[in-house]
Image (spheres, helix red, strand yellow):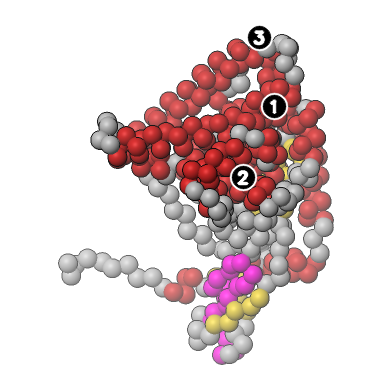
Amino acid sequence: MNNLKRPIIDPKKFILPPYITCPKCKKSNSFGVLMIGGQRYTRRCRECWFTESYKLPELNKKIIYLDQFAISDMMKAVNDKIGKKDKVDQFYFTLFEKLEYLSSAQLIVCPDSSFHRSESLLSDYSALKQMYEHFSGGGTFYDPATLHRFQIIEKYRAFLGNKKFIFDKEATGISSDYIHGWRPELMVSVDFKTTKKELKEMRESKLKIHQAIADVFNRWKTEKDKTIKDWFKEEGLAFGIVTINQFKDLLIKQSMYAIGQPTTIDEIVKLAISESNTLITSMINYIKSGTQEEKIKKVVSFLVSDEMLEIPFNKISALLWASIAHASAHGGQKTPPNQGTVNDIEMISTLLPYCDAILVDNAMFALLNNGEVKKEIFKYGTKIFSKNNKQEFFDYLDEVKKNANDDHFKKVTEIYGDNWGQPCWKMYH
């Protein structure tokens, strides 16, 4: 044991540039940056250890969501180890450079999400994770089930109080981290190990979903007498029906277990921690009077009512699927939506209302600019970009830079040093 070498960590390593003269010991180039976060930052002297914190101006960063294809191609552009640099479109080099500058300038944040993680797990996970975390700076969207629950609860509370529902993207927060805070210099990234079995189950799940969509697609092709409104209502009410059925399964399993019928505690626990049970239980808690049975009936009646058609994520999703159904029935779409489309629709319907801008692929760009979908998206003020209008996206990013004043850039330099705007081309070295 005595022969083991213990690592020695010099605490001075955590005091970073830019260094200035210490106000206490007057030593030049010793008073560096120890910590940055939220609306404050802290300096410490490397000589006398004098420490002082300072308040920072409030930020209102533009929230820009980057679809997985952009993360993947920027990673290939920057990561020499992949060996695909020569095959990557110049668009992604320019995109990386512009996002890097604005992100370092604390003018934008590109939050990562569970969609990034799930799509990255089946590819070059570590490299992709490094890229999306590079631009998120620790800002991660809550998972879809949580954001869905937030929206449904807000609508439900308005319904119970006979008030008009007004969607407020800042009402409950969108991330466990303060997304508009000043970005720390040092970040710790933690991840849970994913087994081969879990990866196999993910692939199998994607195939099952694709097959289910293909079956529905074939049905849509025969429904030529339906209108977009018919499909919209069908898709919009499906969420509530699925939620109720899962909740019923839990009640049935609990009853079976109580009377000794064949079931297992694992099955019950799995249903008890499900998204459906969490949502319905939360909704029940907002009802002040009545028996448990009466409360459940009230929640169930809401979940299958037209009230659900006004909730942002559900409305956007239903409109997107209704547009695809209409195209299927009238020959505009010949082949079933692929696995990527299913994932993209869930991502867009969940996250778009919280974003100032979103970069999607060309197919989703066309769908989002289609009729009723475009009218709904317009309400959130989210700008939609793809490679189809890449110059408009670059112009938008340039405008963000132009709108920042000199005082802001001086403060950024004070905290992060003179080289803060340099692209991190060697991030994978």
CB atoms of marks 2 and 3 within 8 Å = no
**Region of the chain picked out in magenta, as a range:** 25-45
Q: Earlier in the sequence, mark 1 or mark 3?
A: 3
Which mark lies nearer to you, 2 or 3? 2
Q: Residue 251: image x %, image y %?
A: 41, 38
Do we see residue 154 in this rendering?
A: no
Task: Tell me how many marks there are.
Answer: 3
Classify mark 3: helix, strand or loop. Answer: helix
Label 1 – label 3 distance at C-alpha: 17 Å
Please give the name of the residue rendered at 71% of the width and 70% of the height, measured from the top-left corner.
57
Classify mark 1: helix, strand or loop. Answer: helix
- Observer-nearest residue: 137 or 277? 277
Label 2 – label 1 distance at C-alpha: 18 Å
Q: Earlier in the sequence, mark 2 or mark 1?
A: 2
In the rendered image, the vertical position of residue 40 relative to residue 167, given as above or below = below
Classify mark 2: helix, strand or loop. Answer: helix
Q: Residue type at mark 1? A: Phe
Q: Would you identify the image quadrant in which residue 339 lies? A: top right
Please give the name of the residue rendered at 63% of the width and 63% of the height, measured from the top-left corner.
181
Residue at image mark 3: 222
Q: Residue 284: image x %, image y %?
A: 53, 48
Instruction: Tell me the quadrant of the picture where the N terminus can be found.
Output: bottom left
In the rendered image, the vertical position of residue 429 relative to residue 314, given as above or below = below
Q: Earlier in the sequence, mark 2 or mark 3?
A: 2
Q: Residue 132: image x %, image y %?
A: 57, 46
Residue 274 vs residue 409: left or right? left
Residue at image mark 2: 152
Picture disc at residue 232: 1
For label 1, the crowd category at 10 Å Cα-Cα, with few meaning under 14, some 14 to 19 and many 20 or more, is many
For label 3, the crowd category at 10 Å Cα-Cα, with few meaning under 14, some 14 to 19 and many 20 or more, is few
